[in-house]
Image (spheres, grey):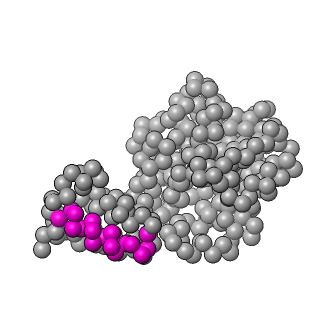
Amino acid sequence: MSISIAESLLSAQGRLQSSSESARLDAEVLLAHVIEKSRTYLHTWPEHLITDEQLTHYQQVIQRRAQGEPVAYLTGRQEFWSLSLKVTPATLIPRPETELLVEKALEKIPVHGRLHVLDLGTGSGAIALAIAKERTMCHVVAVDMSAEALEVAAHNANEHSIQNVEFLQSDWFSKLVLPKFDLILANPPYICDDDPHLYQDSIRFEPVTALTAGTDGLHDLRLIINQAKPYLTQQGWLLVEHGYDQATAVQALLIAAGYHEIADFNDYAGQARLAMGTL
């Protein structure tokens, strides 16, 4: 039986109402993905009939979304900065709040600066590629311990024709060889191992190794802050994303490690999110 775009969306929205805070948006994004059209098309042609095959596919992805699977994994795409990025279950889904890390990093890099930048735990490559795209004279090294994640990041670089990024498989600094970097950026895991949110909502579908960091959530932040110094140029900067309740602890780690000009910034939602310091 043929069904219109409008009818499909209404049914899907009702199906998602109890499981998603953005039921209508999810329904639209997923239908646009299934029929390979834009969301504008959905609004322009609500009476258009979708095929039985499309309807079956759509119902399947709506069911998966109703069970909590992230929209980004269902479509295989996520918007970040000015980039549409491929994402897979091997990569963390880039969050809007992480754009603050890009924003603050760009403030430290002159438009035509030839700085060396290191992105630790690059995942889909979101941070590294945003920096490299905005500062084309910079050389960006993006590392991740996951070969699968690096494959996704390299795909995203090729898709956007970004050539000033080098990818390296490394557990943080373990495979890095000097020279030093002018900026080191990291959005490391910072959730406590026993945080109940890990088993709720869509976050439970994301790679746990990209989320958890010991009993206090500071294991990786502590390691990065302490080990970054030999890899920074004099007056080089370290910028790290942290949890909303970790600002005081992270600033204390920076002070203890000998950093100066330490500052912390709130994200666009008003939550403490980013700490930085220099040598």
Part of the protein shown in magenta: 4-20
Q: Residue at x 63, y 52 (%)?
A: 270
- Give the residue displayed 21% in from the left and 51% down from the top: 44
Q: Is residue 177 above or below residue 2?
A: above
Which of 191/208 is in front? 191
* Residue 217 figure quarter: bottom right
Q: How many marks?
A: 0
Q: Which residue is situated farthest in the left direction here?
A: 1
Q: Main secondary structure of the magenta part?
A: helix
* Residue lying furthest top: 112
Question: Does residue 37 appear anywhere in the picture?
Answer: no
- The quarter of the image holding the C terminus is top right
Q: Position of residue 8 (x, y in %)?
A: 24, 68
Residue 7 located within the stretch drawn in magenta: yes
Whether the magenta-drawn stretch holds residue 199 is answered as no
Occupied quadrant, residue 235:
top right
| Image quarter of the N terminus | bottom left
The percent position of residue 127, horizontal first and vertical second, equals: 56, 45
**Residue at point 20%, 58% (across, down):** 46
In which image quadrant can residue 184 be found? top right
Left or right: where does residue 254 sit relative to residue 11?
A: right
The residue drawn where x is 27% and y is 68% is 10
Q: Is residue 183 above or below residue 70?
A: above
Q: Is residue 160 visible?
A: yes
Residue 99 in the image: x percent, y percent? 56, 46
Residue 277: image location, x then y, percent? 77, 41
39 or 139, nearer to the observer: 39
